Image (cartoon, rainbow, N blue to C red):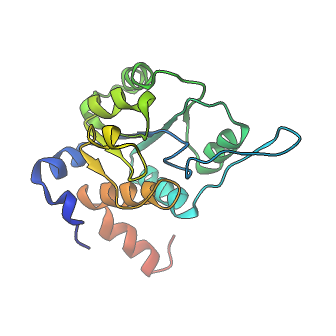
């Protein structure tokens, strides 16, 4: 499999090879950014299964995953648990300090992180991460801060695109594909 054209930049590919932590916002990245509220006050979120499977694949390859989100949602807790995401930070207004603390706790540098976000609370983390990523639906001034803007929209496979690219650039892709071709997944 070949990398998409935007990722042919050798410097970006090299930085992706060093990523050991994929951190991301939730609303607008793992979801389409819309919030659905029921009359009883309940909240509904839609998550794409492609993104979830991509997260599982990168975790199997040794890349840790973190969710750092401004909202506090039981659905996000449930989704994180279902995907085996151990690093969940909700109710976070300023994402970069949490990303820094997480790196320190994991013995990583910011250069070993990729961060994907779509709005103002994400911009500092996008700029400071080893690879800053945004999605097409983010405002232009956020996308301009990113090293890479995914081709897929948030909530519609953007995270899977990131995960597949990490697996490819780090040399895991053939082994992942082989596992599924031979029914060993």
Q: Residue furthest left?
A: 10
Where in the figure is residue 180, as x and y percent of width and height? 46, 75
Query: Residue drawn at (32%, 66%), measured in percent from left and top?
Result: 173
- The quadrant of the rendering that contains the N terminus is bottom left
Where in the figure is residue 178, as x and y percent of width and height? 38, 75
Residue 114 in sight from this viewpoint:
no
Q: Is residue 54 left or right of residue 128?
A: right
Relative to 168, does residue 13 appear above or below in the rendering? above
* Rendered image quadrant of residue 162: bottom left
Which residue is nearer to you in this view: 176 or 159? Answer: 159
Relative to 56, does residue 22 appear above or below in the rendering? above
Query: Residue drawn at (52%, 22%), measured in percent from left and top?
Result: 93
Q: Is residue 173 left or right of residue 95?
A: left
Q: Residue furthest front?
A: 140
Q: Residue furthest right?
A: 40
Which residue is nearer to you in this view: 91 or 81? Answer: 91
Which residue is nearer to you in this view: 175 or 125? Answer: 125
């Amino acid at each position: 499999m070949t990398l998409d054209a935007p990722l042919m930049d050798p410097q970006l590919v090299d930085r992706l090879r060093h990523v050991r932590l994929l951190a991301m916002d939730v609303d607008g990245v793992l979801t389409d950014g819309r919030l659905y509220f029921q009359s009883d006050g309940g909240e509904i979120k839609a998550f794409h299964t492609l993104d979830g499977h991509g997260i599982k694949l990168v975790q199997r390859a040794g890349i840790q995953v973190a969710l750092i989100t401004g909202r506090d949602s039981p659905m996000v807790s449930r989704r994180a648990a279902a995907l085996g995401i151990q690093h969940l930070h909700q109710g976070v207004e300023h994402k970069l300090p949490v990303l820094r603390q997480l790196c320190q706790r994991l013995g990583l540098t910011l250069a070993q992180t990729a961060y994907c976000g779509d709005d103002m609370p994400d911009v500092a983390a996008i700029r400071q991460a080893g690879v800053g990523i945004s999605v097409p639906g983010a405002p232009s001034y956020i996308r301009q801060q990113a090293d890479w803007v995914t081709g897929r929209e948030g909530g519609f496979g953007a995270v899977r695109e990131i995960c597949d690219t990490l697996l490819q650039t780090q040399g895991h892709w053939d082994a992942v594909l082989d596992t599924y071709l031979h029914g060993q997944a």
